[in-house]
Amino acid sequence: MQTYGHFINGQWILSGEVIPVINKYTNENYAMIHEADGETVAKAIEVAKKTIERVELTATERYEIIMNASKIIEQRKSELANILVIEAGKSKKDALMEIERGIQTLIASGEEAKKLAGHGVALPNEHSKMAFTVRVPVGVIVAITPFNFPFNLTVHKIGPALAAGNAVVLKPAEVTPIIACKLAEIFKEAGLPDGFLNLVNGRGSIVGDYLLENPNVGMYTFTGSPKVGQYIKSKSGIRKVTLELGNNSPNIVHEDVADIEKAVNLCVTRGFSNAGQACISVQRIYVHENIYERFVELAVQQVQQLQLCSAENADADIGPVISEREAMRIESWIDEAKTQGAKVAIGGSRRGNFVEPTLLIDVDDTMKVVCEEVFGPVISIQKYASFSEAIERANNTTMGLQVGVFTSNIRNIMYSTKKLQFGGVIINNVSTYREDLMPYGGVKNSGVGKEGPAYAIQEMSEEKLIVLDY
Ligand code: NAD
């Protein structure tokens, strides 16, 4: 069985308590990781700091290394996708799609390396001075990543961070760390000098504080739950932070939707892909009362087509959720909604860590399955009477990452883009729509700062002003 430690200065260091990484399909041990102690974390940060003091890569060199990494990943696509199937419990198609998206995210990051530049600054009261800005690396960036897209979301952090010339200390989610360990090795093979990308393994509740307390870190980039995001913000002082957090994504389908079948298809396929474990998964659907019955009927028919994967067959549509504990939590939320009056239109059962794709109706906005983040294959469908009511109910949340709206009325489109309090408003597609180059990030408790390589590279570099007095 493979055991991974901590990747520091281009070498694996095997130290600290050993914890298992589970195969999410079989619940058997798949690999082992060591958990970093305070000394190991301090060493990783020290190495990262010394590396950027000692080595400066040109933008073209950074671009070439990132492109090399993307080519290695392309060649090893199916092997890497298989790791995602095992450690994250993905279906094969979701795993492959994630690797393919990660390649595109990397290529876009490499391209940004060559474009990063400051700009001229006007000094209207001066005769003999000129000013301009340059963009310089922040320094050491700590990247903390979640379990649900452990490849692409890691690439979204280390791609732009390295493109901007920073050194990185990565802490992957302890339940899905192996794909990140492979990435560290791939970057070394791609020609990244030792020390630019370091990785420490272990549980966030243990390793997190060592990372957060170290004064040599210039920035934290985090994707994960709002609870941990708030903790990181509270501990990081005045250092830079980007937080990509949760959502309970609403989607509005108005009576004038151009193609109801397309809307249903998108809601169902994108609500249940990755077993609903995406921060922008379709969770709450608000459907106009005139088309509600038809929408529910079509949605049930569509869900009937979906097949659960199994340990023998990951070729089907929906894999397990990340752990049996999470599956039980999701089941308990469904059961609680039922006791509060919700009806299961289809699904609703759990077997081990597999949860059936579930559609709930007769729900209300106070039920957990609606007002909190389910992070599982559970969608609720509610009816509304007026478009403004739907907008109000979509906004009635502490979160605000992305929202989908289906309408063919230009006034409704303009009204919704103005009124919806979300980082992204997706018209005639679902909240789950994401092209990796887009600016991506939430408002309210969904976070601060933007991802998408062109935006993340700005967050991960400082704008330095230069004034020349001649
Ligand atoms: P999580 O917050 O439990 O863990 C995320 C990472 O934080 C892991 O690496 C974990 O080890 C680490 N961590 C945990 N406690 C820590 C601490 N005290 N200090 C420092 N690090 C700590 O999240 P998760 O369960 O892995 O992922 C699910 C959550 O992520 C959901 O809420 C989801 O919406 C969110 N998410 C958001 C986005 C986005 O882009 N906005 C994308 C994917 C997932």
Image (tube, helix red, strand yellow):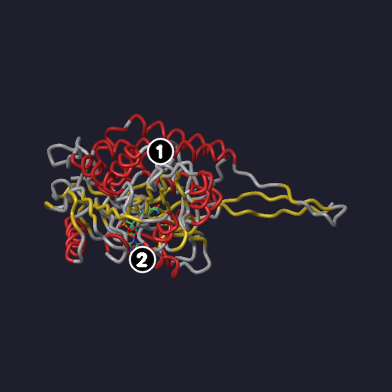
Callout 1: CB less than 8 Å from ligand 1: no
Callout 2: CB less than 8 Å from ligand 1: yes
What count of labels does the image hold? 2
* Gap between marks 1 and 2 measured at Cα: 39 Å
Q: Amino acid at mark 1?
A: Ala
Which element is circle 2 on?
Answer: helix
Q: In front: 98, or 433?
A: 433
Q: In front: 231, or 220?
A: 231
| Residue located 20% across and 61% down the image | 329
Which element is circle 1 on?
Answer: loop
How packed mark 2 is, by other alpha carbons closer than 10 Å (few <14, some 14-19, many 20 or more), is few
Residue that badge 1 annotates:
258
Horizontally, residue 139 falls left or right of residue 338, namely: right
- Residue at far front of view: 290
Percent position of residue 22, x then y:
19, 51
Q: Is residue 219 above or below residue 451?
A: below
**Mark identifier at residue 227:** 2
| Residue located 44% across and 42% down the image | 436
Q: Is residue 122 visible?
A: yes
Horizontally, residue 237 falls left or right of residue 332, namely: right
Percent position of residue 321, x then y:
22, 51
Q: Amino acid at mark 2?
A: Lys
